[in-house]
Image: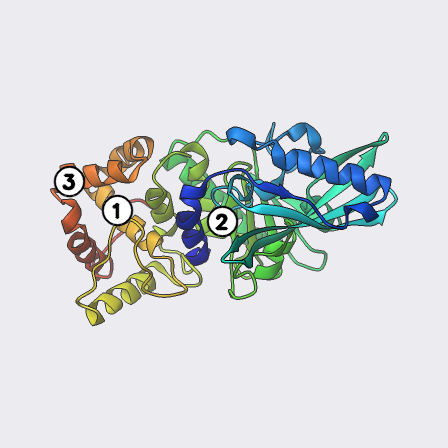
Amino acid sequence: MNKFFFIFFTVFFASLYAQVSVQKNPYEGMYTDDQKVINEIWNKYLNSFNEGGEGDCSLWKKNKYLSDNKCNILSSQGYYNPSLFKLSFKNQVISIEPVTADLYKIVSQFYTINDGVLQPFAITNVMAEKNNNMFLLSDYLIYTTKDWKSHKIGKINYHYQTGYILNEEKAKQANATIGNIDKIFKLDISNDIQYFLADNCRQVYTISGFDFAPSMNNVSDCAFFDSKNNIIYTTIRNGENHKHELIHRINIQYPHAHYLLLSGLSIYSNQKNTHIGYSYSELFTKFNDYYNEHKTVKPVLIDAEPFDKKISIDYLIGAIVIDAILEKGGIDLLLKSLDTLETDEDLYNFLEKSYSVKKDQVGDWILLRAKKMTEKDFKFKINM
């Protein structure tokens, strides 16, 4: 998954954590009675995030793909973190379009205004369905994939378009990966993975309800894991065994683990495509080459500057930390770290205590560890 913008977005808005601000649509006077009701329901839902709330799910129709007591797939789809609905955006309805007599599509935009310039960050689609003279909000995913095929293999429910031939051998390999991950990390997750195979990156976004999100048209490939609902969105290019996203299953049981640990684990394997088409060794070769050419530049542990516009450096730094933890104390220390290392300070303190690496020495330590990753005798210390 290409998270360059994702990481920038998260860091930039972390200090602005707040609910969305509902903006009046200047054309509301032209709404029909049904459109007025739908507009009120949508605004009521946005306002239900007041004071850190999780949103009023009583306003939503139950989605069979979501975990119990969860609603609104856009709030956990994977691209925005924190949730799109928990950031200080303005939201304005663009249109409420009738699809049938009892079904409408709500198109709205999330945006900011900086120095008088409107900056959109998402244009989304949500459905509204009338049942027993009452409208409920509904996920766009249900509407866009209603004619898709579904096929369950092991713990994975695959969803794909008519005409696509599911590779059952790769699906069996994916289940083997899940079994191995569950055993290594002692995961206790009962619900199956919902696995959506889209044609391309743009469709990964659009099926879940995005008309626009930054970079959705500019990346060759993308995928997302919804850890709240155990859902994977990926492309047919990545196929039925997208190991990077399957490894993110660990996130469900360790939601508070430091993001570098979870990011690093997702590429800590010998798969050919660990991150946007690159293998593990290819990623670290690029990493080492960059810093060999820029000897005055040193990486940092937190909020590191990217060395390549396509590659998220956090994955690589996270993998370095993961490898060091495993070298020091094996899987037992890694499991303990996932439970106890939550903040940046936790991570800095751990490195100083375990490796005698002080904060101002971390850059040199990262470079030394990175070189180890491309040595001929390097071996992964766990097999995922």
Q: Nearer the viewer, mark 2 or mark 1?
A: 1
Return the x and y of residue 252 as percentages of the image width and height. 46, 35
Element carrying mark 1:
helix
Q: Secondary structure at mark 3?
A: helix
Kindly identify which residue carries mark 2: 173
Q: Nearer the viewer, residue 245 or 241?
A: 245
Sequence-wise, the earlier of marks 2 and 1 is 2
Mark 3 or mark 2, which is nearer the start of the sequence? Answer: 2
Labels 1, 3: front one: 3
Report how many numbered discs are placed on residues in the image.
3
Residue under pointer 3: 352
- Res. 234 visible in picture: yes
The type of residue carrying mark 1 is: Val
Checking the image for residue 373, the label placed there is: none
Q: Identify the secondary structure beneath mark 2.
A: helix
Most extreme residue toward the right is: 101
State the residue in front, 207 or 16.
16
Q: Are marks 1 and 3 in contact (CB under 8 Å)?
A: no
Q: CA distance from mark 2 to mark 1?
A: 27 Å
Q: Which mark is residue 321?
A: 1
What amino acid is found at the position of numbered circle 2 in the picture?
Gln
Q: Position of residue 241 (x, y in %)?
A: 51, 52
Upstream in sequence: badge 1 or badge 3: 1
Quadrant assignment, res 103? top right
The image position of residue 42, as x and y in percent, is 69, 38
User: At which x and y percent is residue 384?
Assistant: 38, 46
The disc labelled 3 sits on which kind of residue?
Glu
Mark yes or no: residue 190 visible: no
Question: Of 95 and 374, which appears nearest the observer?
Answer: 95
Give above or below for 146 relative to 368. above
